[in-house]
Structures are given as C-alpha cells and as structure tokens.
Amino acid sequence: DTGVSQDPRHKITKRGQNVTFRCDPISEHNRLYWYRQTLGQGPEFLTYFQNEAQLEKSRLLSDRFSAERPKGSFSTLEIQRTEQGDSAMYLCASSSRLGSYEQYFGPGTRLTVT
Amino acid sequence: DQQVKQNSPSLSVQEGRISILNCDYTNSMFDYFLWYKKYPAEGPTFLISISSIKDKNEDGRFTVFLNKSAKHLSLHIVPSQPGDSAVYFCAAGTDKLIFGTGTRLQVFP
C-alpha cells in the first residue's frame, strides 16, 4: 500500500528563483489537495483538483503560484519568483470522493527561501 | 477570521490517564470533522473523523464527540500512551479542510 508521496522533501532556493514540487496521490483517489503550513499554524488550504479539473483556489494562491494535474494523476505546484515569505512546508493530500472524506497527507516538501 | 480554534496550545497527561483535546468552530455548514496527529517534519496522519449528522465516533482508544449546538468537538484518548505525544490538529470541512492551530500533547510516564 503506497501512500501519498512528495518530491523533493527539502528545497533550498534563493529569492527570485522558480521552484516546482511534485505530488503523487494514492492511486485510486480522484481528489488531490495542496496545503501550506508555517510554524505554529495548522495547514492552510491552497487549491484542490478533482481528476484533472482545478475546482477551487484560495486567495493565498497568488499569481506567482500555479498548480496542475494534467492527467488526473500526479500534480505539480510551481512558485515563480520566490520570496522569503514563501518559506513553509507544502503538503499534498488525496481523498476518494466516493463515500469517504478523509484526506491522507504526504510527508511534505520543506521550502526555504534565502 | 479563524473558523476552527484550538484554544489550548499544550496539554500534559500521565500515562494511562485520559487525554481530552478540544476544538471549537464557527461555521455550522461544515459537513464533517477530523482529527490528525503530527510529528515534526512529517505530514499529518489521519486519526478519526465524524460526520455532522452524528455525535460520537469511536475507534479503539480514540473517541470523537461532536456537540453541534455548542459548535464544539473533542477527542478523547484512553488510556494515553507515551507514543501519543505529538501535535494534534482538528479540522473541519465540506470539500477543503480548515485546520485549527494544534495542541501539543505530552504523555509522561
């Protein structure tokens, strides 16, 4: 049983650079979510997909952020022109809409912008 | 506007006793509520959930209670074990989840 996987686990980048994270959900799950967590806070919702359709985006997701799920399987989250305030743990979760609403999280990608 | 609140940042409980973690919410439209456990540098691990149409759900040592009139949710862990020491988040949602800020539980021998 493979859970949600995320790559990379850690990313250090300089301010102004672009970064891309990947998430592979549990194989039979059709919903995929992105959250961001900073120190002392709970995860905050960024966006989610049902299959390949992006259904909702948070106002936290500025125009520097873009997420895709091109074939309804894995997803990517790209941050352009990174800022120090983007430093956080980026979490991916997946769920199956059919009779279950529990979301299962991956290990996260820790982003540090210097 | 914080829709889900965990007012106790920390809780310390002796091994074998009951741990009670509390959560309050403001949005009566939430369909379901969940509790997650989190260790440092890891993603949250799902523990237990409850639908808004129920008032109790039990799974082994974990029981979640929902009081809709008070907009209050609690997680009971009985008996508490040292391995339960972690940060616990409550979450509520319809599609996306809204998380509280977490309660750090420490279970001591």
Image (cartoon, grey):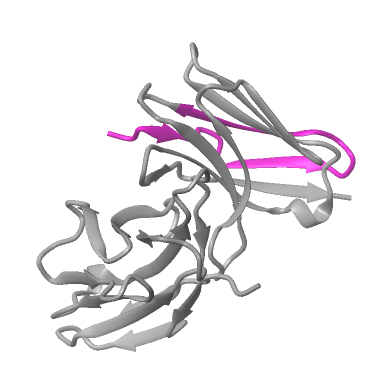
Q: Residue at x 38, y 68 (%)?
A: A90
Q: Which quadrant of the structure image shows residue A3? A: bottom right
Q: Position of residue B47 (x, y in %)?
A: 65, 48
Q: Is residue A90 above or below residue B1?
A: below
Q: Which quadrant of the structure image shows residue A6? A: bottom left
Q: Residue at x 61, y 75 (%)?
A: A2
Q: Position of residue A26 (x, y in %)?
A: 52, 68
Q: Residue at x 56, y 27 (%)?
A: B73
Q: Nearer the viewer, residue A5 or B16?
A: A5
The answer to whether one can see residue A114 in this image is no
Q: Which quadrant of the structure image shows residue A43? A: bottom left
Q: Nearer the viewer, residue A59 or B107?
A: A59
Residue B7 within the segment the image draws in magenta = yes
Magenta-drawn segment: B1-24
The answer to whether one can see residue A88 in this image is yes
How many numbered discs?
A: 0
Q: Position of residue A42 (x, y in %)?
A: 44, 51
